[in-house]
Image: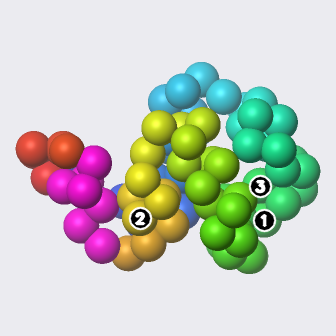
């Protein structure tokens, strides 16, 4: 399995859950503009925002926001 960048992991995870930016922003208690800036790599989320996003998407903060072997961290045996 090809590794994705953290930014792309966030977008893919959101889409895999069938959510728009508005949906995720609402559920994570963020503005859509803030989420858009996070997804485009213009800003990093606060730890609190990263935690809320990770809880909604059921992924680790590391998988969504850090360069690392994130697939293995989330139990993907094919990575």
Picture residue at 19% right of the left edge, 55% below the top: 72
Picture residue at 43% right of the left edge, 45% below the top: 59
Residue 73 forms part of the magenta stretch:
yes
Picture residue at 75% right of the left edge, 34% below the top: 27
Measure the C-alpha gap from mark 3 to mark 1.
5 Å
Dot 1 falls on a residue whose secondary structure is: helix
Measure the C-alpha gap from mark 3 to mark 2.
17 Å
Q: Disc 1 marks which residue?
A: 37
> Residue 14 placed where, x, y %?
58, 38
Q: Disc 3 marks which residue?
A: 35
Q: Residues within 10 Å of mark 1 (few under 14, many from 20)?
A: some
Label at residue 62: 2
Tell me where the magenta segment starts and ends, as one range: 68-74
- The reply to whether the C-beta atoms of the residues labelled 3 and 1 are less than 8 Å apart is yes
- Counting residues from the start of the chain, the first of labels 1 and 2 encountered is 1
> Residue 78 placed where, x, y %?
10, 44
Place residue 21 in its image quadrant.
top right
């Amino acid at each position: 399995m090809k590794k994705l960048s953290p930014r792309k992991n966030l977008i893919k995870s959101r889409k895999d859950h069938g959510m728009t930016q508005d949906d995720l922003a609402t559920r994570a208690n963020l503005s859509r503009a803030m989420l858009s800036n996070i997804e485009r790599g213009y800003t990093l989320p606060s730890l609190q925002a990263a935690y809320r996003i990770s809880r909604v998407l059921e992924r680790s903060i590391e998988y969504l926001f850090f360069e690392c072997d994130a697939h293995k961290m989330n139990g993907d045996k094919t990575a």
